């Protein structure tokens, strides 16, 4: 899957998740999840989603899924459904919903700031807290990619967030991520140093335009001049709506939010993540912020040969992802890297119990 966190995230809106199977984590002895159509409100928006709940017993702890960038519906290209069923089969209620203006939800996700998305996640938690089959003090947030920016922000705003599962999220000033992504993707796909230099220079120019006050037309003219170059498909085109959407969020820095997170945190990255970049520096930012919060309950898992989506990957590059997508059409999907799903539920079960 290619799901970069800023310009792929904020300017391309692309999400190529594929169909993720559960075969790498077989659960033949667990009853299937019960899936319920639900609705909840955030401001003027009515958000439609799927609630995955265990077939047995209750009340249960619960997980809110905060999805990545772009026009994502609750299925998240197959990832949301896979996660929902896995969490439910493991004894956890799980909620995923269509973004505002996507699927059956009202509103416009382009108009949202990261703060808006964080408050939306807290509204989802309040909805779950009112349900009899949910343990109200054991509800937390799973956030992937852009959702990995939103999750700690939500936890910093509300003590009711019982845990955070941080997956492949960019850390630090948001505007800097695109420079990291462009270089990492081109390098993974074997581009020359000259092409990498040209592409990163263009990416820096685009960031400067978005961070400034100039009009979209200035960027669009620059895009027209380079759109036929081989590296441009890695940079991605930014349209008018996404240009101004990006401007709302480009100045955000994730670091301070971690300084106010006091709940248990599970951090997961793949070492072939070309969207957020090498995980070591990202983890250091998280640890530094949690240390300032006096929070020592942090667990870090970095998976070998895993990409931004925690799928098996040798390079994490775009070319490899496209080849895999072609195979998926014939072989019905790809798997998460071994252990990813079970790591999350084992970590949750140890701290909160599963309610099974």
Image (cartoon, rainbow, N blue to C red):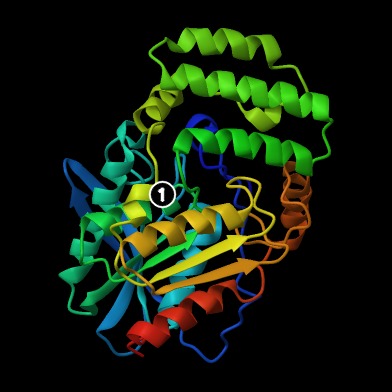
x%, y% of residue 52? 37, 71
Quadrant of the rendered image containing residue 271? bottom right
Tally of marks: 1
Answer above or below: position of 8 versus 207: below
Identified at 48% across, 16% down, the residue is 209
Q: In which quarter of the image is the C terminus?
A: bottom left
Q: Is residue 325 visible?
A: yes
Quadrant of the rendered image containing residue 213? top left
Circle 1 Cα neighbour tier, 10 Å, few/some/many (<14 / 14–19 / ≥20):
many
x%, y% of residue 140? 32, 68
Element type where label 1 sits in the image:
helix
Answer above or below: position of 305 versus 112: below
x%, y% of residue 143? 42, 57
Identified at 76% across, 19% down, the residue is 229
Answer above or below: position of 107 versus 256: above
Given residues 59 and 277, the one toward you in this image is: 277
Q: Can residue 336 be seen in this view?
A: no
Q: Name the residue under label 1.
A: 149
Give the left or right position of residue 60, taking residue 299 as reference.
Answer: left
Answer above or below: position of 211 versus 67: above
Given residues 244 and 73, the one toward you in this image is: 244
Given residues 51 and 185, the one toward you in this image is: 185
Give the left or right position of residue 178, taking residue 286 as reference.
Answer: right
Identified at 38% across, 32% down, the residue is 251
Identified at 49% across, 88% down, the residue is 30
x%, y% of residue 196? 75, 29
């Amino acid at each position: 899957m290619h799901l970069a966190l800023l310009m792929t995230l904020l300017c391309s809106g692309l999400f190529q998740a594929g169909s993720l199977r559960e075969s790498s984590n077989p659960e033949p002895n667990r009853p299937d999840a019960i899936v319920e159509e639900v609705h909840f409100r955030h401001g003027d928006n009515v958000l439609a989603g799927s609630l995955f709940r265990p077939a047995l017993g209750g009340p249960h702890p619960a997980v809110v899924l905060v999805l990545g960038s772009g026009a994502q519906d609750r299925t998240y290209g197959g990832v949301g459904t896979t996660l929902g069923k896995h969490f439910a089969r493991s004894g956890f209620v799980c909620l995923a919903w269509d973004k505002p203006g996507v699927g059956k939800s009202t509103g416009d996700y382009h108009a949202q700031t990261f703060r808006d998305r964080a408050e939306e996640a807290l509204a989802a938690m309040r909805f779950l807290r009112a349900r009899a089959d949910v343990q109200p003090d054991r509800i937390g947030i799973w956030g992937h990619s852009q959702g990995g920016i939103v999750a700690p922000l939500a936890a910093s705003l509300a003590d009711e967030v019982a845990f955070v599962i941080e997956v492949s999220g960019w850390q630090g000033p948001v505007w800097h991520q695109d420079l990291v992504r462009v270089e990492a993707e081109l390098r993974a796909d074997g581009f020359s140093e000259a092409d990498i230099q040209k592409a990163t220079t263009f990416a820096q120019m685009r960031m400067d335009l978005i961070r400034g006050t100039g009009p979209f037309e200035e960027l669009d003219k620059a895009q027209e001049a380079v759109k036929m170059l081989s590296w441009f498909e890695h940079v991605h085109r930014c349209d008018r709506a996404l240009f101004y959407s990006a401007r709302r969020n480009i100045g955000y820095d994730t670091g301070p939010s971690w300084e106010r997170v006091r709940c248990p945190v599970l951090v997961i990255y793949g070492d072939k993540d070309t969207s957020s970049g090498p995980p070591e520096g990202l983890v250091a930012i998280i640890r530094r912020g949690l240390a300032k919060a006096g929070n020592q309950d942090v667990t870090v898992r970095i998976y070998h040969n895993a990409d931004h989506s925690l799928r098996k990957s040798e390079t994490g590059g775009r070319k490899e992802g496209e080849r895999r997508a072609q195979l998926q059409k014939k072989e019905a999907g790809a798997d998460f890297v071994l252990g990813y799903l079970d790591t999350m539920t084992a970590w949750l079960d140890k701290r909160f119990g599963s309610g099974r």
